[in-house]
Structure formats: structure tokens, C-alpha cells
Amino acid sequence: MPGSCDEMTSFVSNQNDTDMRFPYFATGEVVKGFGRGSKQLGIPTANYPENVVEKLPSGFDNGVYYGWAKVDDGPVHKMVMSIGNNPYYNNEKKTMETYVINDFDQDFYGSNLKTVMLGFIRPMTSFNSIDDLIKAMKKDISDANELLDKPNNSVYKSHNFFKTPQVKL
């Protein structure tokens, strides 16, 4: 039964013949990031710890991806994930920052986050201003909403991966 980061990150299968990266399943504890998502951007993100990021296969270019996410034993929601070093902020470390498309009442640091990435939206890029960054992020969210409504993507909302019991990592 899946439960650890090692087991999840090794379960990669193809959604179509042209892209062997997807779907990509990951799970891990939500850790504190840089604190910019909520405060500066108004788009709070859940960050995976370094051990999950380090297991990401090299085929995942820095960029923005879409898929599904589940926090602890809650419902499955649409998500957008940024993978990379966020050039606007000149980060040195690669991160996996997930925006779960849902309004949460509070932070969920320490919670278990399960995600399945289903596709690529755009490459990581720098922006001239914070407003340009926010505008791009809102477009990413809009694009993800549309893509995840397609039948070949919406089936993953009820994937067995999200039904397995939470395992403390």
C-alpha cells in the first residue's frame, strides 16, 4: 500500500504516449515556506519538504503544473503547483509550492498533503513586477480549472491514491 514519499514518487505512469511524466503522485508533510504566498501574493501555498523535492525526477522542468490535491482526510481539490526556484525572488533552492484551489479557514502546516500532477501549464519565468506575477498566477489558476474539468483529468479526483489512509511521514 502506498504511504511513503519513496513509494509515491516511484509511481509514475503515462497519461498519454507523449509525456511519461504524468500522472506524478507525491505526498509529504506541509512545511513553512517563505511566507510570501498569503502575505504578498494573496495566493497561499503549501510547501513540500526538501526530501520530497529531492525525489522529483529530473524530467520535471521548472514551471507551473496542474492537478489534484488533498490535505489530511479532507476532500480532493484542484491545484496548481510551482516547481523551481522562483526567479522573481531569486530563490536558491528548488521548491514544490502547491496552491490548493479552495478557501481554507487556517494554515495547515504539519498536515499531510497528497498531490497528483497531471500536466504542465508554463515554464518558470521572472516578472517585471509583483502585479505581473500575481496576474500570471491567476491565469495559471484559471487554466488549471479549465484543464481539470476535462474528463481525462477529472477522473483523477477519485483516484485510489486519495483514498488510502494517511500515513505520518
Image: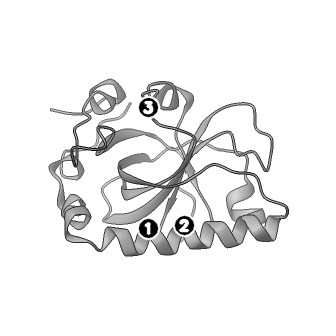
Side (left or right) of 35 relative to 99: right
Side (left or right) of 71 relative to 37: left
Q: Residue 38 location, x and y as percent?
A: 69, 63
From this view, report whether residue 21 is shown above or below residue 77. Answer: above
Q: Residue 133 location, x and y as percent?
A: 73, 64
From this view, report whether residue 42 is shown above or below residue 80. Answer: below
Mark 1 = which residue? 144
Q: Which of the colour schemes (rainbow, by chain, secondary structure, one colour) is used? A: one colour
| Residues marked 1 and 3 touching at CB (< 8 Å) | no
Q: Residue 114 location, x and y as percent?
A: 36, 47
Residue 25: image quadrant is: top left
* The N terminus sits in image quarter: top left
Tell me which label, 2 or 3, sits earlier in the chain.
Answer: 3
Mark 3 = which residue? 59
| Residues marked 2 and 3 touching at CB (< 8 Å) | no
Q: Name the kind of residue labelled 3 in the image.
A: Gly
Residue 140 is marked as 2
From this view, report whether residue 2 is shown above or below residue 83. Answer: above
Element marked by disc 1: helix
Q: CA distance from mark 1 to mark 3?
A: 21 Å
Which residue sits at x=33%, y=24%? 6
From this view, report whether residue 77 is shown above or below residue 62. Answer: below
Residue 156: image quadrant is: bottom left
Q: Name the kind of residue labelled 2 in the image.
A: Asp
